[in-house]
Amino acid sequence: MTTATFSIRSLSLIAQNTLREAVRQRVFGFLLLLALGLVLGVHFFQEFNFGTPELRFIADLGFGAIGLLGAVLAVTATAQLFFSELENRTVLTLLAKPLGHAEFVLGKFLGAAAVTGLFCGMLTLLLAAVLWSRETTLMRDYPEAFANGQAVNYWQLAITGGLLWLKLTVLGSLTLLVASYARTALFTTTTGALVFLICHLQSFAQDAAARSDSALVRTTVRLLGWIFPNFQLFSPAAAGGEYLIRVTGYALAYVAAACALATISFRRREL
């Protein structure tokens, strides 16, 4: 194969084509419809609210649905989009254009990241509309409960959606790293789901290790903390300006490392 110099145009074309393919996938349509149904119908779950203010409950449940289904999308879409090129042998044609391995890997990543961004953006806007509609009704029916004005901070809502997308982007990059050396999409999807679970349990593992008397346990958890990102950090609880900059840098560092390792691994792969 010919060695190609890095081209932003080629990278952009791969990313655009990946985005088009992802939007056409049945899994994207199914997850989007499921998430739309959950977000639109979220206020019907109020009877399961054990004392939490209604609007907060709606927001938490809505973002919970977006986060869970978005994680499924990030893992499955990344795996399927990557392996579809290998199974159809189109990767050989693309790399003979000439197209560099880095452009192919980064293009796939950016396309998948754009899909999760589209997913999070649409559903965050929809959730904001649901909250605004319900808040307007409550303000009309119970004006005394809103003496200080609106209860929903829509700017904070947008930040939460952005942090959620950052988390899914990191998950997508780690799934892509697995795909770069894995032999099947099923293995990649399963490993991606396991990575998602590990990243979410980081805080609990660190707290448990801090209370442990075993040096081996503490060292192991500390090592895993360097390898796997802590998804609990993408919480909007302390989302001030400085925090947002730090967590964005944290996400970009993991994305850059995962994409670099994926490119190296893909270069060595037998196609």
Image (cartoon, rainbow, N blue to C red):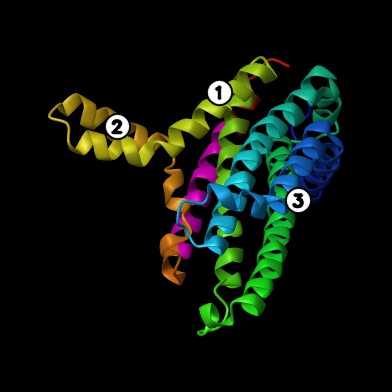
Compare marks 3 and 1 and give the one earlier in the sequence: 3
Could you tell which of marks 3 and 2 lies nearer the N-terminus?
Answer: 3
Disc 1 marks which amino acid?
Thr
Crowd rating for badge 1 (residues with CA inside 10 Å; few <14, some 14–19, many 20+)? some
Quarter the N terminus occupies: top right
Say which quarter of the image contains residue 240.
Answer: bottom left
Taking the view exactly as shown, the residue that stands out farthest to the left is 213
Residue shown at the point (86%, 42%) measured from the top left:
20
Front-lying residue, 199 or 33? 33
Looking at the image, is mark 1 or mark 2 earlier in the sequence?
1
Which label sits on residue 8? Answer: 3
The residue singled out by tag 1 in the image is 191
Residue at image location 72% in from the left, 33% down from the top: 77
Q: Distance between the residues labelled 3 and 1?
A: 30 Å
Instruction: Answer yes or no: is residue 160 visible.
Output: yes
Q: Is the magenta stretch mostly helix, strand or loop?
A: helix
Residue closer to the observer: 243 or 38 = 38
Q: Is residue 160 left or right of residue 81?
A: left
Q: In this view, does 54 lie above or below 71?
A: below
Q: What type is the residue that disc 3 sits on?
A: Ile
In the image, the segment drawn in magenta is: 244-263
Q: What residue is drawn where x is 47% and y is 58%?
A: 52
- Residue 159 is situated, as x and y percent measured from the top left of the image, at 56, 64
Please name the residue that numbered disc 2 is placed on: 221
Q: What amino acid does circle 2 point to?
A: Val
Is residue 268 visible to the viewer in this orientation of the structure?
no
For the residues carrying marks 3 and 1, which lies nearer the camera in this image?
1
